[in-house]
């Protein structure tokens, strides 16, 4: 267990593992995502209330899932950064924050476009939408803070604290549809309960969610590898790897 | 198929523009982020390669240069 923990802290070890997993993550992710989206767009039945506009769900829900999961994983990494000073945890936070930002934007954008034909408005200042907008600003803040501080270690600590403070927003997003009156429909997708939608709609959604999670794994691998290369370019193992052409 | 024809699939009973705009933006941003991440990785690799190649060339040309050299320096003792 502890050996595993130490290995996880080693950039060199991670670099090798990431290189091995990346093709599988990419191929599996794209396959599941495309299958889910084609199924959802062309083959899933039409919603009796919302008509065809509901097909946006197949990208809206996965994007929102990713937006929140990435933030939670960043918060876990932030704890590891603060408590154990593990290098890789900070590399993860820095590498993945822009991906989280993009998925949060996608969630807000697809939500707004879906809202127009369904609610009659692009935007309302209700709890779910506002807390999601705050999540967008949290991602932006973490990226900006990291760029603003030159010293790597102080930047890592400052960003970790910001990410941890912002994590209070996550349960607010999660339960906003239950705590307050909102236009947003309650969550359609839980693993614990029986799905609130027919199987022909739920299956493509499951596929696209899983596909996007795998793609997130791919993003994490390649972006962490880049960050490791930048930070460790003077070390012996990077030099040996580069000169041997094993990249 | 949930649609009778291809034009019905594109139109989506009037909801077509909303659905297709969402999917287009999603595809563009996802693909853009993937290309950007790959490019950044290649730049970082290229950077490392250039640095180490110049370094190893420099040390191959002057093998003695990397190790420290000592010269006797006369220091007046008074």
Image (cartoon, rainbow, N blue to C red):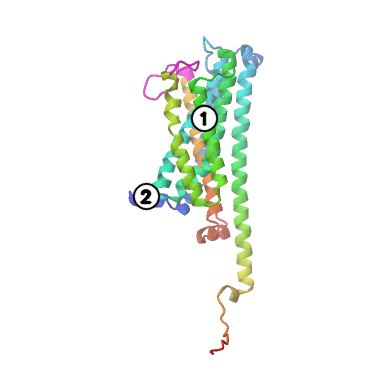
Span of residues in magenta: A180-201
**Figure check: A205 above or below A26:** above
Tag 2's secondary structure?
Answer: helix
Q: Are marks 2 and 1 on the same chain?
A: yes
Callout 1: chain: A
Horizontal side, residue B8 vs residue A217: left or right: right
Q: Residue furthest right?
A: B7
Callout 2: chain: A
Q: Nearer the viewer, residue B17 or A34?
A: B17
Q: Residues within 10 Å of mark 2 (few under 14, many from 20)?
A: few
N-term-proximal mark, 2 vs 1: 2
Q: Disc 2 to disc 1, how far (Cα)? A: 36 Å
Q: Which mark is residue A134?
A: 1
- Residue displayed at 51% across by 19% down: A126
Residue A136, percent across and down? 54, 32
Asked if residue A185 lies in the magenta stretch, the reply is: yes
Q: Which mark is residue B49?
A: none
Horizontal side, residue A111 vs residue A13: left or right: right
Asked if the residues shown at circle 2 and circle 1 are in contact, with their CB atoms under 8 angstroms apart, the answer is: no
Badge nearest the viewer, 2 or 1: 1
- Residue displayed at 63% across by 31% down: B28
Residue A129 in view of the camera: yes
Q: Residue furthest left?
A: A1
- Residue displayed at 61% across by 46% down: B40
**Figure check: A196 above or below B56:** above
Q: Residue furthest top?
A: A48
Q: Residues within 10 Å of mark 1 (few under 14, many from 20)?
A: some
**Label 2, on which residue?**
A4
- Residue displayed at 52% across by 17% down: A44
């Amino acid at each position: 267990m502890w050996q595993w923990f130490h290995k996880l802290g080693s950039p060199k070890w991670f670099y090798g593992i990431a290189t091995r997993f990346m093709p599988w993550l990419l191929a599996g992710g794209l396959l599941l995502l495309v299958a889910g989206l084609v199924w959802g767009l062309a083959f899933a039945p039409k919603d009796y209330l919302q008509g065809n506009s509901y097909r946006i769900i197949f990208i809206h829900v996965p994007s929102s899932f990713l937006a929140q999961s990435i933030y939670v994983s960043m918060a876990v990494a932030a704890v590891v950064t603060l408590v154990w000073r593990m290098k890789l945890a900070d590399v993860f936070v820095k590498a993945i924050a822009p991906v989280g930002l993009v998925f949060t934007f996608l969630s807000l954008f697809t939500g707004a476009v879906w809202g127009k034909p369904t609610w009659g408005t692009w935007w309302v200042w209700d709890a779910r939408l506002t807390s999601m907008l705050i999540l967008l600003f949290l991602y932006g803040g973490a990226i900006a803070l990291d760029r603003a501080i030159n010293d790597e270690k102080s930047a890592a600590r400052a960003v970790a604290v910001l990410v941890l403070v912002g994590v209070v927003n996550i349960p607010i997003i999660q339960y906003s549809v239950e705590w307050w009156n909102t236009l947003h429909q309650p969550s359609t997708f839980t693993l614990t309960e029986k799905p609130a939608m027919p199987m022909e709609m739920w299956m493509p959604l499951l596929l696209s969610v899983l596909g996007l999670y795998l793609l997130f794994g791919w993003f994490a691998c390649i972006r962490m590898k880049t960050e490791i290369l930048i930070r460790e370019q003077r070390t012996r193992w990077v030099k040996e790897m580069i000169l041997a052409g094993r990249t | 198929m949930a649609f009778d024809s291809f034009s019905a699939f594109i139109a989506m009973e009037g909801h077509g523009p909303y659905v297709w705009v969402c999917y287009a933006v999603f595809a563009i941003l996802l693909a853009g982020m993937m290309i950007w991440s790959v490019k950044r990785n290649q730049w970082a690799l290229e950077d490392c390669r250039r640095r180490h190649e110049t370094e190893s060339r420099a040390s191959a040309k002057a093998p003695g240069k990397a190790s420290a050299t000592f010269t006797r320096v006369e220091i007046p003792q008074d």
